[in-house]
Image (cartoon, grey):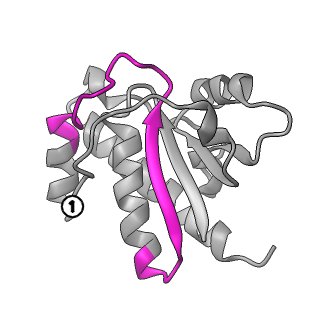
Amino acid sequence: MVRVCFVCTGNICRSPTAEAVFRLRAAAAGLAVDVDSCGISDEERGNPPDPRAIAEAARRGVILPKRRARQIRARDFDVPGLLVGMTAAHVRALQLRRAADAAASVHLLLDFAPGLEGRDVLDPWFEIGRSDFADAFELIEHGVDGLIRHLQSPP
């Protein structure tokens, strides 16, 4: 079983979306996974997913987890698996918190998506553009699909 924990800033938009999309697509691919999500910050701790993220996911047939936002914990690094950040800033924050002997590895989500390597899934919470939640969802889908292909490929 593979453990994947998706990480964004507050754990109310991007990471719960990635968790839900990954859970659905991994099941369809027959992958045994333990999937979770969390935030770098504690500012949203205890809050449910953003209603706009819930609505965008529902439009696409995806149900976001009914759970409350949480901040990353030291023990998240102790379990073998992947910690997958939405932005380079999340990856840097994870790398700074990760001990040299940590079992979990740190990755950028879109590094798994051919042609999108190095790109960030920007935070739609600020809603600078009218399609921010749709754009973020589509990028998350590309990253998740690439991650599943990566997990299915032989070591």
**144 is higher (above) or lower (below) than 70:** below
Q: Which residues are magenta?
A: 27-53
Residue 31 in the image: above or below residue 23: below
Which residue is most to the bottom? 30
Q: Amino acid at mark 1?
A: Arg
Res. 52 image quadrant: top left
Q: Residue at x 40, y 65 (%)?
A: 23
At horizontal 42% and vertical 57% (from top left) the residue drawn is 141
Check the image and report above or below for 100 versus 1. above
Q: Residue at x 59, y 56 (%)?
A: 113
Q: Residues within 10 Å of mark 1 (few under 14, many from 20)?
A: few
* Tag 1 residue: 60
Seen from this angle, which residue lies furthest top?
A: 43
Q: Is residue 55 left or right of residue 106?
A: left
- Percent across and percent down for residue 13 are 31, 36
Is-magenta flag for residue 128?
no
